[in-house]
Image (cartoon, rainbow, N blue to C red):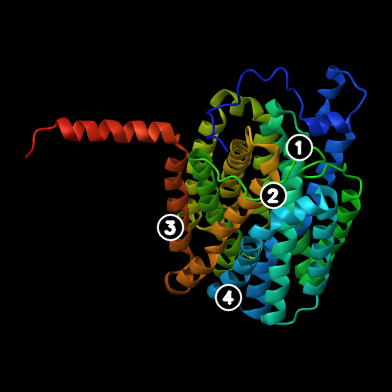
Amino acid sequence: MSALPEEAPADIGEQRLSPAILEILPGQDETAREKWLFSPVFVRLLATNAAFGFSVSTFYLLPKHLAVSFAASPAQIGLVTGIFSLAALLCVPFLGPTVERLGYRRASIAGFLLMAACAFNFAFVGRIGPVLWTLRALQGLAASIVFAASVALVSAVAPPDKLGQAMGLSGAASLAMSAVAPAIAESLGARYGFGYAFALAGVAALLGAMASRRLPKVDGMGPRLHVRLLPTIPGPDRRAVLGALAVTGAGFNVVMAFLAPFALRHGIIAVRDFFISYTVAALGIRVLGGGLTDRLGLRRTAMLGITLYGIVVAGIGLAGPAHMVSLGFAFGLAHGALFPALMALLFQDVDARDRTWLASLSNGVLQLGMLSVSLFGTLANHTGFDLVFVLAGALVAASSVLLVPVALRRLVRGRSLSTEMLSPPG
């Protein structure tokens, strides 16, 4: 892979749409094909992402369930949360070839069915132990399969000059469920028990499997491309983006794992207001803020987003959970701008033969960062949640330097070295 450019190349007029979308929409003129956003293909993809988001977001309340139902310690909550990420990380070497072999559609169906089976079984788990850990690991595997198939399909069907918008909108369908699912799960858990909430997550996953059956049959490699025996190693700029994605994942998982227990210790029972304001802000910035991203550029948007992301994570620890609405809104603004920019930077000008490999790698790197929640949980046992939020936020904000273009960093280092050589000794 080549190094990431600052923006997409200007000369893309002859490749307005990817070969995949041209095959999906045959017999249409160029003007009609440019309406890809409203095509049945993209609408079906949004439906599967919404089902995925609902099922996954329901388990944002798993830490609260562990704390309330089993009196789990921060270390135990961190372990259960981290197992999901560990399983997703370990499957990275096999995920790309598996999705390629199955094809995006069949991989999505298989992943959703496994998600459904895990969610239904969660409804019957009565204690923290091997059964719960196994189900959480299988969830991580299933979610990784669905995520890789979805991201690869988006990059296959979206026009090259609309990749950032496509990533943002496809993610928005999943993100919208971050408000709906926790609110429903929290109400069900309080009134009937969390088993009903987990069963509902299983139903959502089954609906995702049904919707996946209507996805286009776009195989990863297609009949005219050959699978590379070894994936191409990402260039330095792309590796830097992957590093930023990992650190951001750490900050995200700290918030998702410890916000509810943190609030409970401050006497706040419900956390749905945080998720609602977070989702409203994230969706707003993705739907209405596309022009801002275009003016700033993907890289600048990502740098500003990751800095704000870190500040908000640290702010949760400094301000406390009493400011749920304002903190959730700021978290959503940062999240809504950051993740589409990072994913678009990763997939900009990527070779079609590396598409699924990069999708699985990005998910693995994200889960690697999320896995650190186990360490943060152990730390919280000794220091409390406040310091954990502050440390995680500082780490995320500092990672913005990773997004400075490699060429610029080398130039700065070169100038610094030249200055040192020209300076008189002593």
Amino acid at circle 4? Gln
Give the label on residue 156, or none: 1
> Is there CB contact under 8 Å for labels 3 and 4?
no
In the rendered image, the vertical position of residue 321 relative to residue 130, given as above or below: above
Residue depicted at x 70% and y 38%:
352
Left or right, residue 58 beside residue 244: right
Give the label on residue 76, or none: 4
Separation of marks 2 and 4 at Cα, in angstroms: 27 Å
Please say whether residue 425 is visible from this viewpoint: yes
Residue depicted at x 70% and y 57%:
95
Between 326 and 234, which is closer to the camera in this rendering? 234
Separation of marks 3 and 2 at Cα, in angstroms: 25 Å
Secondary structure under badge 1? helix
Separation of marks 3 and 4 at Cα, in angstroms: 20 Å
3 or 2: tag closer to the N-terminus:
2
Q: Nearer the viewer, mark 1 or mark 2?
A: 1
4 or 1: tag closer to the N-terminus:
4
Residue position marked by numbered label 2 in the rendering? 276
Amino acid at circle 2? Ile
Left or right, residue 402 beside residue 96: left
Give the label on residue 391, or none: 3
Between 126 and 6, which is closer to the camera in this rendering? 6
Task: Judge the density around disc 1: few (<14), some (14-19), many (≥20) Cα neighbours within 10 Å.
Answer: many
Residue depicted at x 38% and y 35%:
409
Residue 87 position within the rendered picture, expressed as x and y whole percent measured from the top left: 65, 66
Q: Quadrant of the C terminus?
A: top left
Residue depicted at x 84% and y 18%:
30
The residue furthest left is 426
Separation of marks 4 and 1 at Cα, in angstroms: 40 Å
Residue 276 position within the rendered picture, expressed as x and y whole percent measured from the top left: 69, 49
Residue 361 position within the rendered picture, expressed as x and y whole percent measured from the top left: 62, 51
Task: Judge the density around disc 4: few (<14), some (14-19), many (≥20) Cα neighbours within 10 Å.
Answer: some
